[in-house]
Image: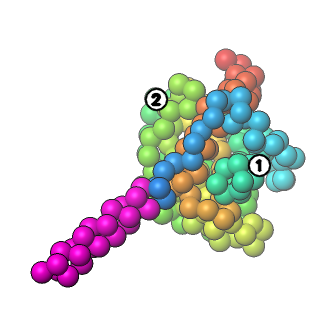
Amino acid sequence: MKHVSAITAEIKLCRVALFLIIVACLQPIRLAHSDQVDSIWIETKWPFLMDQWGEGRSFQCNAADCGAELNLYIRAKIGFCSSTTGVADDNELERLSDFDFMGGQATALGSGREIDISGMKGRLRIYATASSILSQTHAFSVAFNNNSDALVATVTVKGGPPAAVEPVIIHFLNGETIRRWVTHTLGL
């Protein structure tokens, strides 16, 4: 009987240990103050050719700071969004997204979700990517709007689970660097 009790206790201990490991793995990356988060993102040169929407801004965050190597590309699409509905659904997000300039295939990994960036409503969706230009395996499409002006961000993820870095991306998009750029670009 003691042997059965010992085995039962060991199983319970293993369950608790497994639970703690799972909880630790699911913990989001700790976010610092906005100034600190903005400082881990380094602005880089816009890598894409000019098109009808012009150049945007490009930022990079290394894996040590963000949990995966992230490249964020953001630009305004003035007058290209419905001012009555905004970025209300995944079809509108697809229409606004910038995956076409990356020269690859993007496949949605589920439905998008509503987000709020600096008081503007929008949508975010995770994709699996296959590209001859970029070796990333996942990307985010993020679009939010102010009236009929859309702001579109594409974030490529290399070397980490996309869901784990989503809070870092949202935090940066809500940070002072992007807020100043949006205010200047849209004349708010």
Residue 81 shows up from this direction: no
Answer left or right for 175 relative to 19.
right
Q: SS class of the residue under badge 1?
A: strand
**50 vs 7, nearest the viewer:** 7
Check disc 2: other Cα within 10 Å, few if <14, some if 14-19, many if 20+: few
**Disc 1 marks which residue?**
60
Tag in front: 1 or 2: 1
Give left or right: position of 129 versus 65.
left
When the figure is inspected, residue 64 is found, relative to residue 104, above or below; the finding is above
The correct choice, above or below, for 136 with respect to 5 in the image is above
Q: Is residue 26 left or right of residue 184?
A: left
Cα gap from disc 1 to disc 2, whole angstroms: 33 Å
Spot occupied by residue 75 in the image (x, y as percentages of width and height): 72, 40
Q: What amino acid type should be assigned to the residue bearing mark 1?
A: Gln
User: Residue 57 location in percent, x, y?
Assistant: 78, 40
The residue at the far left in this view is 1
For the record, the magenta segment spans 1-23
- Tell me which secondary structure the magenta stretch mostly adopts: helix
Relative to 109, 152 lies left or right: right
Q: Does any portion of residue 21 appear in the rendered image? A: yes
Q: Which residue is mark 2?
A: 84
- Pinpoint residue 168: horizontal percent, then vertical percent: 60, 44
Q: Residue 16 in magenta?
A: yes
Name the residue: 57% across, 42% down.
30
Q: Residue at x 49, y 59 (%)?
A: 25
Q: Where is residue 32 shown, x and y percent of the image?
A: 63, 35
Give amino acid for label 2: Thr
Label 1 vs 2, first from the N-terminus: 1
Q: Quadrant of the C terminus?
A: top right
Which residue is found at the position 70% from the left and 22% from the top? 183
